[in-house]
Every structure is written in structure tokens, then in C-alpha cells.
Image: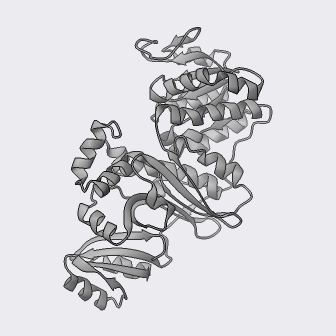
């Protein structure tokens, strides 16, 4: 099977390395080799660190369109021109593998429709969870289930920062600078720390898990930039870990609650032990009960592992290509079920005053902190109107 790679950066280089290093095993499974014959590189191969012997390197996408490759791997990233490249390739009968979460969250239904019309496959395991075989687990391994809930840590940058704030008692600003120096955060970290990266991922994952089309703009998102290290410390004392959590829940047939927000995770939750750049997802279904997957959420070889796995899936499925297509559009709304919350007021007196006024029963702790069980949505909204409220976090897990 002949392969082209669009973009030979971190992930694209990893694809070269995984295929070349593991070629013997790959060929023993497929009965044929995977051969990278073409690569799109804007510098036409200058300064590449991978072996490109016998690879045609070009900066002209038309050369890829007109080639005889079977599969094209898109690792360029971004919405444009990657989206138009993929659409054209699928229409020309070439299968596509991508790790482009931004693009998929915005255009996946359109691209899948093109693929199905032209008998091609669009696979994207690496777009969510990096090296964790998460999408395949949801689409195939758990396909006999009615899935009800997804709860995950899906961004290594934000999790690294929060781990530093927790274990080293650093401020957010200091932890961010360390993450940038260590290569875990971009010079412009907005996509990661504001939660947009996670919003893309939970949109893609929820679409597969719940079988519904989702508008990414309907997903509420709150990042980690406003987290006070005081709440990290107080939460730790109470047995919680502050994590940026992605949640997707089926409320009824086509109504979902999907959001991204910092939450207090109880020590009993498997996610409380997911630290630094690791990712993890807990999945609930009516047959499996609860299961979880953990592993590296990013990295050159880690992400390439998922990309090459998709190429191998195409080699096995190319004679009967079929892409999942949702039957309905999801309605996204707030979860109106009573939920547990950690709240912190300016002082204990203000906490007692607000809770008594709203007739909310709570465990009042030190420094104005209260733990509230089964707080109805309408009372939570009223609670957030108090000027004396310093912080509020949903609690993930049982109190």
C-alpha cells in the first residue's frame, strides 16, 4: 500500500519513523508493506530529520492529487488549506488519515459525506487522546453498548500546568512558563489553556459515542487561566484534584450535555491519578458499566502510533469502506440534574449567609469553603450571583 504524508513536522516525522521501524511486523499483519512514496513539505525536504530515500517530496498538492498513492496522511493541522485538501483527496478516491481535531470538530460531517459518496475512508484515531486507542474502543470495542457518559482529561498542556500547581504549589503563571520551557506548551498557549483544544476533542468523541451530529460552537468551554492556586491547595486538603474535565452525557434520545470546565475530582475517581502530560477517559455504558483508558495524549511517536494503526485499518477495510454518519443533530443543553459542588466564599461568615438565604444544606469547611451535595441548577445560578463567591467547581465523583 502506497502512502503520502502531508506535513513532515512532529507527527509526520513520527509516521515515517513508525512505518520504517516496524515495517516487518506491519507487513506480517497486512501481507504487504506500507510504503511512503510521496510527501508534501513547504521546504521541499530541506532540514528534514527522517529517511526520505525513494520518497518524492513536493510543495505542490497537485502532485499528491495526481499520484498513485492509496492513503494520504494529513498532519499539517489547521482548518485551511488542510480541509480543502482532504475534501479533494477523498473525492479523488484516496483514503485519508488525519490527526486534525480542529478541522474535524468543524467539518467532519461534510468530509464524511464526501468520503461515503466516493467510497473512501476517513479515519482519525489520533485526533483524540493521541496514542490512546480511544475512538476505536468507542466505535468498535464498545459498539454493543448504549453509552451514557464520557468524562476525560484530554489536554496534556493544561494537565501539566495543574499538576505543577498541585505538587509544586506553583502559581498558574509560573507553571505556564515552566510548561513552555519544557516544550509542553506553545508560545501562544490559548488553544490549550482556554480549553478550546479539549472542546474539539470532546465534540469528536461525543459524536461517535452518542451517534449524533454536534455543533462544536454549542459546547460550553471554560479554561484554566482563572484557577486560583488557593483552590488547588484547599481542594487537595479535602481530597480533591483540580483537573480540566471534558464531559459528555446523554440526557435523552437526542439531547446531550457536553462541556469543558475545571472540576474538583475526588480521590476515588480514576482521573485523580492522571498527572502531567497524561490523558485519561472514563466511559459508562449500559452493558460494560464503567471502563477507562489512559495513556500519552501527545508526542511524535505516540500520535504516529495511532495514525499508522488507522492506515493498517484501511488496508484491512478498503474493499468495503464505510464511514459512520450520525442520523440526527444533537441538542446541547446544560445538565439540569442536581450535581455536587465545591464553593468558596470570601470568608466563612459570607458562606453561611449565602447558603442560609438560599436554603442550601452544605458541609462548611475552613476558609469559606463549602461542599454541597445535589445542588439544583436554579440554586446554583442564584449562588453565582453573590459578589462574595470567590470560586465554584463541580465535583466529579461521589462525595
Q: How many marks?
A: 0
| Percent x, y of residue 28 | 75, 25
**Residue ranking furthest to the right:** 319
Q: Is residue 81 visible?
A: no
- Residue 142 sits above or below residue 135 on the image: below
Image position of 41 (left or right of 149)? left
| Percent x, y of residue 267 | 44, 67
Q: Please tell me which residue is depicted at 42% across the width and 70% down the height of the picture.
A: 395
- Residue 395 sits above or below residue 118 on the image: below
Instruction: Give the position of the N terminus as an image quadrant.
Output: top right
Viewer-nearest residue: 276 or 319: 276
Viewer-nearest residue: 245 or 248: 245
Image position of 178 (left or right of 145)? left
Viewer-nearest residue: 80 or 371: 371
| Colour scheme of the picture | one colour
- Residue 120 sits above or below residue 351 on the image: above
Q: Please tell me which residue is depicted at 25% across the width and 79% down the height of the picture.
A: 366
| Residue 274, picture quadrant | bottom left
- Residue 317 sits above or below residue 12 on the image: below
| Residue 78, picture quadrant | top left
Instruction: Give the position of the C terminus as an image quadrant.
Output: bottom left
Q: Please tell me which residue is depicted at 54% across the width and 23% down the height of the picture.
A: 17
| Percent x, y of residue 343 | 31, 75
| Percent x, y of residue 377 | 43, 78
Q: Is residue 140 visible?
A: yes
Amino acid at each position: 500500500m502506497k502512502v503520502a504524508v502531508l506535513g513532515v513536522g512532529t507527527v509526520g516525522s513520527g509516521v515515517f519513523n513508525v512505518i520504517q521501524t516496524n515495517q516487518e511486523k506491519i507487513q506480517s499483519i497486512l501481507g504487504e508493506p506500507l510504503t511512503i512514496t510521496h510527501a508534501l513539505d513547504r521546504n521541499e525536504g530541506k532540514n528534514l530529520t527522517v529517511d526520505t530515500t525513494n520518497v518524492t517530496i513536493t510543495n505542490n498538492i497537485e502532485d499528491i492529487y495526481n499520484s498513485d498513492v492509496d492513503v494520504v496522511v494529513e498532519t499539517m493541522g489547521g482548518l485551511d488549506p488542510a480541509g480543502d485538501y482532504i475534501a479533494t483527496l477523498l473525492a479523488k478516491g484516496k483514503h485519508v488519515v488525519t490527526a486534525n481535531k480542529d478541522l474535524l470538530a468543524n467539518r467532519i460531517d461534510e468530509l464524511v459525506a464526501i468520503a461515503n459518496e466516493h467510497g473512501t475512508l476517513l479515519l482519525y484515531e489520533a485526533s483524540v487522546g493521541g496514542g490512546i486507542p480511544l475512538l476505536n474502543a468507542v466505535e468498535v470495542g464498545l459498539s454493543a453498548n448504549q453509552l451514557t457518559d464520557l468524562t476525560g482529561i484530554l489536554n496534556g498542556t493544561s494537565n501539566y500546568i495543574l499538576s505543577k500547581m498541585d505538587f509544586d504549589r506553583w502559581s498558574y503563571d509560573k507553571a505556564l512558563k515552566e510548561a513552555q520551557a519544557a516544550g509542553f506548551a506553545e508560545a501562544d498557549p490559548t488553544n490549550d489553556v482556554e480549553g478550546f483544544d479539549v472542546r474539539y476533542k470532546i465534540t469528536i468523541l461525543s459524536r461517535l459515542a452518542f451517534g449524533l451530529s454536534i455543533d462544536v460552537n454549542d459546547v460550553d468551554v471554560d479554561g484554566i487561566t482563572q484557577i486560583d492556586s488557593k483552590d488547588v491547595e484547599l481542594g487537595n486538603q479535602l481530597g480533591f484534584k483540580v483537573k480540566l474535565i471534558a464531559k459528555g452525557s446523554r440526557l435523552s434520545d437526542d439531547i446531550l450535555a457536553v462541556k469543558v470546565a475545571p472540576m474538583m475530582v475526588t480521590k476515588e475517581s480514576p482521573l485523580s491519578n492522571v498527572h502531567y502530560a497524561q490523558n485519561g477517559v472514563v466511559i459508562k455504558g449500559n452493558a460494560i458499566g464503567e471502563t477507562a483508558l489512559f495513556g500519552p495524549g501527545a508526542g511524535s511517536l505516540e500520535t504516529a502510533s495511532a495514525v499508522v494503526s488507522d492506515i493498517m485499518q484501511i488496508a484491512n477495510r478498503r474493499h468495503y469502506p464505510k464511514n459512520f454518519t450520525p442520523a440526527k443533530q444533537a441538542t446541547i443543553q446544560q445538565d439540569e440534574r442536581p450535581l455536587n459542588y465545591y464553593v468558596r466564599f470570601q470568608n466563612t461568615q459570607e458562606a453561611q449567609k449565602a447558603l442560609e438565604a438560599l436554603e442550601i444544606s452544605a458541609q462548611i469547611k475552613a476558609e469559606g469553603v463549602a461542599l454541597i451535595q445535589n445542588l439544583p441548577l436554579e440554586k446554583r445560578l442564584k449562588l453565582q450571583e453573590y459578589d462574595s463567591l470567590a470560586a465554584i467547581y463541580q465535583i466529579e465523583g461521589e462525595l
